[in-house]
Image (cartoon, rainbow, N blue to C red):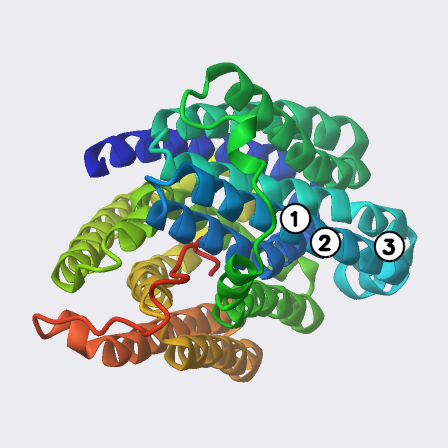
Amino acid sequence: MILRSLGWGSAMAGVRLLTSFLSIKVTALALGPGGLVLVAQLTGFIGLCQSMLGQGLVAGAVRLGAEHGADQERRGQVYATVLRMGAVLVGCWALALAVASPWIAQALLHDRGLAPLIAVAGLAVAAAIFNDLLFGVLGVAKEVGLIGRASIASALLGLLIFAPCAWWWGLQGALWASLSVYVVGLALSIALVAWRSSGLHWRDVQGRFDREIARRVLSFFPMLLVNGVLPALTLILVRDLLASRLGLEAAGLWQASWRLSEACQALVVASVSLHFMPGMGEHAHDPEGRRRHVLRTLAGACAVSALLAAALWLGRRPAVHLVFSTGFEAVVDLLPLQLLGDVLKTAAWILSMALVGTLRTRWFITSLCAYALVFFGVSWELVPVLGTAGAQWGYVAAAALQGLVATWALRDVLWRSTLQVAPVIEGPSEAGRAGA
């Protein structure tokens, strides 16, 4: 399962890497650094909403679905309960976005005239959340290949939508296309599941709503709400700090370095996400097996992340010129610190997900709060002195501190042969993405 997940994860990440580079190239040529950072602000906001509302739902669906894998009726109750909870949450959030759209547009995009864009962003948030839920359920059914096909097809179709819109209609086209790709991606995923899935059918999600399951799903939300909000909100605030202190041009250069390294890091995240979360559920009552699962995943992910960082560092100049343009030459000097932060963040992310899996809520929230405060605090202090490099030092320091806090919290997992299992373990566990 792990090798198959790594294979499909690598294929998904490879296609996403290619499509991401092409979309970055189009954005850089058509909109410049200023447009790049505004598109990032919008997609970052969608990601924030998606993580805030959806990570707990996905965690519940994956963990409880894997726990009741042999009981079709009980598994159906899990999925039906999660879907109904998701519909209520998404509906309320979409209404709130529509009402607050003028203020959000001004604060996020510095243009109140873009309020209609924010007003319909709730549709994109809903599509992103339900697509994550669908992929999570497919992961429980071990249909990794179908997840890979749907993800690859969505990435390619998204590029075909985004690139012409950005090129022909400028910033407005790029922003509206950024929303539409989420909706199109969900429609494509549903079509592929209806056509090709052998382990997931409509009857599997038609169980009755169960209050006990809902309570157990909600127990994930304190941790995953923080995980969904803080990293994404921190990025938005750091981008806004750079734009206000140094201008949109400098903020766009920093965003370019972030996007370039992020696209490479997606290889690790995509591979790990396919097997780590279901694996934690499968080892719910096997402490030693879960310990080995965490340590092996941590070692493998960090090794791959370091190799990718080294390769990008060696070829950073031609990579910047190829992906962006010669006008982004300053990104070459920003990449080394960014790549160091990425390796540290990979380790911190895996350890944080292990905290979710063992329901160490206070430690998980503490580690993420430390990350957010240090990232923004160090950036606030160093950006006036070092420019964009100040934000990168903030990222490195924050990722290192998050990893250290999580390591201390998991010392019984990492340094001993026993794993403390949380008393609620018969309920929820973990899942969710690398938000950070």
* Residue visible at 69% across and 59% down in the picture: 248
* Residue visible at 61% across and 53% down in the picture: 50
- Mark 1 crowdedness (10 Å alpha carbons): few <14, some 14-19, many ≥20: some
How far separated are the C-alphas under marks 3 and 1?
Answer: 21 Å
Does 126 sit left or right of 429 as displayed? Answer: right
Select label 2 or label 3 by which is in front: 2
Q: Which part of the image, by quadrant, shows the N terminus?
A: top left
Q: Position of residue 160 (x, y in %)?
A: 63, 22
In which quarter of the view is residue 311 placed? Answer: top left
Q: As shown in the figure, which amino acid type bears the numbered disc 2?
A: Val
Does 248 sit left or right of 275 as displayed? Answer: right
- Report how many numbered discs are placed on residues in the image: 3
Of 63 and 310, nearer the camera is 63
Q: Position of residue 184 (x, y in %)?
A: 66, 28
> Which residue is tagged 2?
88
Determine contact: label 2, label 1, CB under 8 Å.
Answer: yes
Q: Is residue 46 above or below residue 143?
A: below
Of 221 and 2, nearer the camera is 221
> Which residue is tagged 1?
84
Q: As shown in the figure, which amino acid type bears the numbered disc 1?
A: Arg
- Mark 2 crowdedness (10 Å alpha carbons): few <14, some 14-19, many ≥20: few
* Residue visible at 28% across and 35% down in the picture: 5
Judged from the image, the secondary structure of the residue bearing numbered disc 3 is: helix
> Which residue is tagged 3?
98
Of the two numbered discs 2 and 3 on the same chain, state the one appearing first in sequence.
2
